[in-house]
Amino acid sequence: MSQYVHLSNPDPEWAAVSAHIPIAKPIVSIEAYREEIMAARARRKANTVPEQSATEGLKVIEKTIQVENGEIRVRAYIPDAQDHETDGFPLILWTFGGGESISGFVLGSIDDEDVLLRNLSVNSRIVCATGDYRKAPEHPFPAAVNDTCATLKWALNNSSDFSINISKGFIVGGVSAGGNLAAVLAQRGLKDPDLKGKITGQLLVMPTVVSPHAYPEKFKSELLSFDKDENNKMLPKGHCEKFLEAYHGSNNAPNLEVSPLLAESFEGLPPAYIQVCGVDLLRDEAFLYERLLREAGVSTKLDVYPGLPHGFHIIFKDFKATKKQREDFVKGLDWLLHRSD
């Protein structure tokens, strides 16, 4: 039994809502799933008051850049400098995880994170860069990793134009699949000559860090949450398996850039702030990743949301825990930027 199983006892707000959510149907095909999700998003949007987003006090730059065998949209959010900010801002590369569908690697776009990044840029005084990495199965691994890395280098190569000063901080972050890509980039940063010694922090929100097909034997007794609830209503096991299959195909050979938890060593990685949900197939791997980082001498900070499902803060914006998650997010970023203890 997982040592964290007690965290799956439902939060009262989640219990009240989940009782009315049907168990998700199996995914027949990624294409059909996309159509279904986009239709559901349109219905939600028509019946939801839009969140307020910063429209003043920042500049937004969008470009199309060339990547291997294609092109992607990239975007930078740059706060207007005040008198005391003439020496530039820290940078965060933020990677989306699938939007409201919680289906990273196969769905989602930079538009899903527009409100978050506008507000984060203005309120936290930071340049936010993001890229529309190409999706599986049309563009399987390593397209998403390489596209995200290309976005990161685009921001760095334009640092003077974007008022970026990485001596103030250079963070890689993301949610769910985006958290996976951020963790992979943090590890790439130890070897890539363009990134070596530059990344100062990683912000991982409910990340996936190891494929269930690649669990190390010595940790299998700790990695139980993926099989705990096959009918998880926010991220069902069957759906997660479909997303991963689309991403890396039927090749289940362990790969460090699919499963960053498999690294031989974590020494030298930048500090990590990690958020974990209690009712989440990915729960145990996130806890294990934080522990392995900490044991390797990496500074870590962890916030846990007992009784809440994967991505709850994206769908259930009125939950009390969502307010806490957002406050914790800002505090975690401040911690990575050495703005707080």
Image: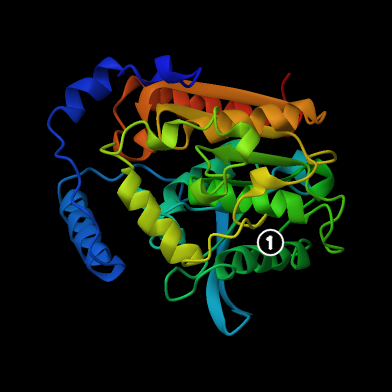
Q: Residue at x 42, y 37 (%)?
A: 226
Q: In x, y percent, where is residue 152?
A: 68, 61
Outermost bottom residue: 69
Judge whether residue 225 can be spotted in this image.
Answer: yes
Q: Would residue 313 be found to the left or right of residue 185 on screen? A: left
Give 99 or 73, whichever is nearer the viewer.
Answer: 99
Q: In this rendering, would 271 be left or right of 231?
A: right
Number of dots carrying numbers: 1
According to the image, what is the colour scheme of the structure? rainbow
Inspect this view and state whether residue 118 appears.
Answer: no
Specify whether 36 is left or right of 150.
left
Q: Which corner quadrant of the image does residue 305 belong to?
A: top left
At 66% from the left and 52% from the top, the residue drawn is 184
**Neighbourhood count class around disc 1 (C-alpha, 10 Å): few under 14, some 14–19, many 20 upward:** many
For the residue pair 229 and 12, the one nearer the viewer reads as 229
**Quarter of the figure with residue 121:** top right
Which residue bears the numbered disc 1? 152
Q: Is residue 217 left or right of residue 48?
A: right
- Residue type marked 1: Leu
Q: Residue visible at 37% across and 21% down?
A: 8
Q: Which residue is at a point 26% across and 67% down the rendered structure image?
A: 29
Q: Position of residue 84 (x, y in %)?
A: 77, 39
The N terminus sits in image quarter: top left
Q: Position of residue 177 (x, y in %)?
A: 50, 51
